[in-house]
Amino acid sequence: MQLSLLTQLRQQNPVVLNISNFVTVQDVANGLNAIGASPIMSEEVAEAEALVQMSGAVALNLGAFTQQQLTQIRQTGKLANQYHKPLIVDPVAIGAVAYRRTIATQLLQDFQVDIIRGNAGEIAALADVTWQAKGIDAGAGDGDLVAIAQAAAQKQHCVVILSGPTDVITDGQRVVQIQNGTPLFQLHVGSGDMLSSIVAAFAAVSAGDYFTAAQTACLVFASAGERVAAQLSQERPGTFAAQLIDELHLITTEAVAQIARYTVGKDE
Amino acid sequence: MQLSLLTQLRQQNPVVLNISNFVTVQDVANGLNAIGASPIMSEEVAEAEALVQMSGAVALNLGAFTQQQLTQIRQTGKLANQYHKPLIVDPVAIGAVAYRRTIATQLLQDFQVDIIRGNAGEIAALADVTWQAKGIDAGAGDGDLVAIAQAAAQKQHCVVILSGPTDVITDGQRVVQIQNGTPLFQLHVGSGDMLSSIVAAFAAVSAGDYFTAAQTACLVFASAGERVAAQLSQERPGTFAAQLIDELHLITTEAVAQIARYTVGKDE
Amino acid sequence: MQLSLLTQLRQQNPVVLNISNFVTVQDVANGLNAIGASPIMSEEVAEAEALVQMSGAVALNLGAFTQQQLTQIRQTGKLANQYHKPLIVDPVAIGAVAYRRTIATQLLQDFQVDIIRGNAGEIAALADVTWQAKGIDAGAGDGDLVAIAQAAAQKQHCVVILSGPTDVITDGQRVVQIQNGTPLFQLHVGSGDMLSSIVAAFAAVSAGDYFTAAQTACLVFASAGERVAAQLSQERPGTFAAQLIDELHLITTEAVAQIARYTVGKDE
């Protein structure tokens, strides 16, 4: 865990290129902007190379894409590899929709990802573990979440973030588990998409240590949500969404350190 | 009216597939999520069959589509019929834009809709009644709104919701009118889109009684808006939008029952 | 400066057609609606002529478009000229992305624009002035902003708005500078997109005086933001975004006049 990455992010203001989910794109842009990064979104392959070159990291969201956008996604992923930019993938709903799983599997052979972030159903699908995913939701299953995340990381040769009530971050061997957070994240569509792009922003300033970047991004994001939720007397998902943007801008490394609850290793 | 449908919706958490209006898609997803459904959005016809199969209802928004998306909309509508999933259509701006009206008329011949929700201008267009529609707004006309809604329902062989200061819900014969609501709905773009998808969520748990599903969804939605507006000292459309999401999550059947104002039949 | 345009806007409720940036489209629609205009968004060229005819002004946002949308953008721009509708262009990120600059330059030869609104990096690119633009942000440069805006206006034969801590509005000769505003605008993605479309709404009711329309729109928008920021004890970009929509609806000409700070001419 390296909270100074948050300070560096705010000093360096890295450009993060997003091939985004059209459902949540404005929220993701605002989340990136609030935490201190400079978001850029694109749907046009003709500008992919220029945008990758000017970016500090690239986040590919595999939710809600069309056949046409696939060309752009594939090209952007390859360019991120070519220009050695950190590449983050969010495999939205691949646990629930066979088509998305097939496409995601193909894409992950076309380029090398540095960090994958998904919920239990999505990461289980990547690890070929049976899971009852449900639409965009995590669904339910009996598997050992740490083992599933590790299997996915080993298979994909990258860092994996399995988001949930407890976030599991692993490079296949090492494991960090973060207990901060709030159930309000599940009540706001796009919390996961926003986290994935914020992970990219941390990766952009991490000098290649993606395991540390991933866990620090998750801790900051979960702590921001927890701090907002603590101020609400009721479960207010709309108010939460607006105040989460506030808090991503306001939260300090000291505030995160004060409430941080995480464990290093497989046991919670 | 059957308020227990709200309880069932929250227990069953139905997946609602949306072919959505790109203008308001995130807001619609958050509204569905807040009330207790599981939203999924798609722009890709290749996954249409899988998504329809896993859904409890399908909502097609005819606002702001491209020629390409038409293929997806038509295919998804036919699949909803084939798999006997409740099908809701929102004919955005067909009263104002001849092109949208032509396309909507064609689509409504390609599949059988269960519920149509629109404003006065949109429903008048479906009923072939002259009306001064204006862009996305309802516009103005002298017609009898109940008669217009009934004519549209009879012509389309489905339940029709004519939204406005008073919501008119009819299956062509029976009529329910809901007086709850707030002018703030008109000040927030996408209120109608959100209601259409929430109607789909109620239809998903209604065991085929779409007339009851439609009126209950309208009553819950209008009551949620009214409760939020009652707490605001001024007309604040931005704050209203965030707190409407809060209230869709928090509102109870008791709270709705307490303020419900509706009449059964043609006379208000 | 002509604050009565705000009153006229609210009385006339002009339809504003937007070819919008998919990142910020809902926010722009809500901003237009809140201030008193009637927004319509489209991605389909087949309805372009009908939509231009029914509109009081047309706003083209060049952020995040695809090759396909270019056809629609070009056609809509030409139709706006043909039907003598005020045409506003927002050249998003053309200072940072060569591809966008090339396309924008071509488009500006295909139709005549009435008002261009951009940040320093974008306007510098139009004026062929060297500038360190950064993604969607203004970037940094040493140029004289008034001279840059004037050069761009002369080159494009239109009114230019250079947005920033001080807004510069010029028709190439005359200059107005507005000092109202808040740094929170930069913290909310889409503030510039929203302003561009609101400028279109003012142009729609300006009887062809686009220099006055542009400066009045900027003053109202900057004042609304400043009034919201003044009520916040901390920099809260999420809360700011929601309350900006509130204030666009609530703000009066008297409230604007009370805090207006602007200078006529080149010296601040």
Image (cartoon, coloured by chain):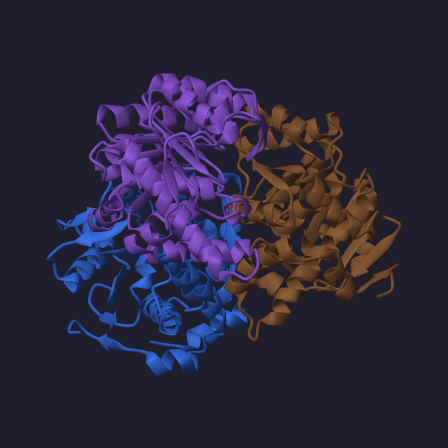
Chain colours: A blue, B purple, C brown
Residue sitting nearer the eye, B65 or B7: B7
Q: Position of residue A173 (x, y in %)?
A: 20, 67
Q: Count all numbered tags in the image, as a single digit.
A: 0
Left or right, C252 with reference to B36: right
Residue C185 falls in image quadrant: bottom right
Q: Position of residue C41 (x, y in %)?
A: 56, 37
Give the residue displayed 34% in from the left and 51% down from the top: B256
Residue sitting nearer the eye, B5 or C92: B5
- Residue A64 appears in the rendering: no
| Quadrant containing the C terminus of chain A in the rendered view | bottom left
Left or right, C96 with reference to B121: right
| Quadrant containing the N terminus of chain A in the rendered view | bottom left
Farthest residue, direction front: B267
Left or right, B93 with reference to A168: right
Give the residue displayed 66% in from the left and 51% down from the top: C195
- Residue B111 appears in the rendering: yes
Task: Give the answer, above or below, for where B100 lies relative to C215.
Answer: above
Task: Give the answer, above or below, for where C145 lies relative to C64.
Answer: below
Residue C183 falls in image quadrant: bottom right
Residue sitting nearer the eye, C56 or A144: C56
Farthest residue, direction left: A142
Task: Give the answer, above or below, for where B52 lies relative to C119.
Answer: above
Give the residue displayed 83% in from the left and 53% down from the top: C1
Q: Position of residue A146 (x, y in %)?
A: 17, 64
Q: Position of residue B146 (x, y in %)?
A: 44, 28
